[in-house]
Amino acid sequence: METFLRCIEASGGASDDGFSAIKLTALGRPQFLLQFSDVLTKWRRFFHQMAAEQGKAGLDAMDTKLEVAALQESVAKMGIASRKEIEDWFRAETLGVSGTLDLLDWNSLIDSRTTLSKHLVVPNMQTGQLEPLLSGFTEEEEQQMQRMLQRMDVLAKKATQVGVRLMVDAEQTYFQPAISRLTLEMQRKFNVEKPLILNTYQCYLRDAYDNVTLDVELARREGWCFGAKLVRGAYMAQERARAAEIGYEDPINPTYEATNAMYHRCLDYVLEELKNNPKAEVMVASHNEDTVRFTLRRMEELGLHPADRQVYFGQLLGMCDQISFPLGQAGFAVYKYVPYGPVMEVLPYLSRRALENNSVMKGARRERQLLWQELKRRLCTGNLFYRPA
């Protein structure tokens, strides 16, 4: 906590419009995040199982809507509650009058923590039996969640005081559902006037587009300001090794090209939202020149101006300055990501980034080539101390 607080103070002192990144695995027990993520994943998987039974498999998340009458019939056949109780769960006051239920409505059922909670069950894929979803969620784990939210609250209030926004880093998929859920709780509280809290979306994941569109729609419905950081992702080897070891579907896009397409699809959707919502913001965290060009082109087409400060660009300190400097000189908001903390704690992070991102070395070689070209140009023109206008 102390390191995070000092980092926020440093960011506030260095800029009038700064960011700080935080990791939730540093604010609580990773085992709790693992268990909570498992609960959320099972509940979402159950929704898609119900959708498949209604012939709606394979649709994008926001296009998947369950017929409430058919859902009530399916739940009644499971024998987990009386028909009267089941009808009370899906009342018009809570789910609207459309006769359908989408994934956001479905998630709200688990939020309620009412008498419904004891009835929430999911099928065990190995035994075929129904199991209580929240049976393993003890009072101690409830308290852990509250403590993590309290720590996030302290950081968010500090960020508000010094004029800094917080980006919650994405982590491995077996932690991420819980991280995103806790981040949403803080966005509901602090993103009232502007996006103080930004969630991070890893576009190398197959479900990245679903995650982005669901959160944008949730922000619209609940009236808070959407804020996002888009990255490609940093845990590919680890994710694939774990999926192969445990035996579940690889969550990563099959190719680099597929990841690029996913990044641009998510980014395009968010930029469209920015056009219609002047309070929404996005951090385009990318070292990819094609992605930066794509962003600039779409901004121009949508009428999003650099001065509006809705779109930000971010690169790691010491990397891809050939992207950062021209953007800054053209008036775009550009940030350099600076690892903050004791040297011996920061070095492992930098080592992981070098190992996990093969494109880093390609970018470094290209940057070195551009530096040599610029040096030769200055020597040949006698303009060694050239300063751009």
Image (cartoon, rainbow, N blue to C red):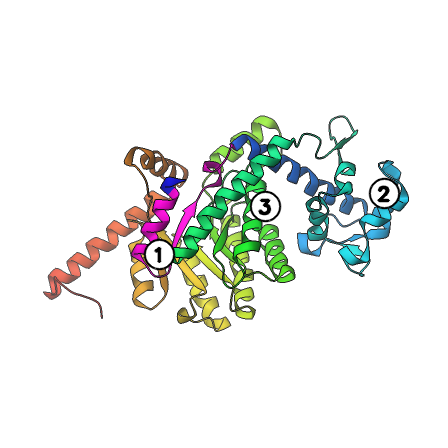
Q: Position of residue 112 (x, y in %)?
A: 71, 46
Q: Position of residue 119 (x, y in %)?
A: 79, 37
Q: Which amino acid does the dot numbered 3 rest on?
A: Arg
Residue occupied by mark 3: 181
Q: Which amino acid does the dot numbered 1 rest on?
A: Tyr
Q: Quadrant of the C terminus?
A: bottom left
Q: Is residue 316 visible?
A: no
Q: Residue at x 47, y 57 (%)?
A: 196
Span colored in magenta: 4-29
* Residue 294, above or below 236: below
Residue occupied by mark 1: 335
| Marked residue nearer the N-terminal end (2 or 1) | 2
> Quarter of the image holding residue 328?
bottom left
Disc 2 from disc 3: Cα separation = 27 Å
Disc 2 from disc 1: Cα separation = 51 Å
Q: Is residue 219 magenta?
A: no
| Marked residue nearer the N-terminal end (2 or 3) | 2
Label 1: which secondary element: strand
* Residue 181, above or below 31: below
Number of other residues with Cα within 10 Å of mark 2, as a class: few under 14, some 14 to 19, many 20 or more: few
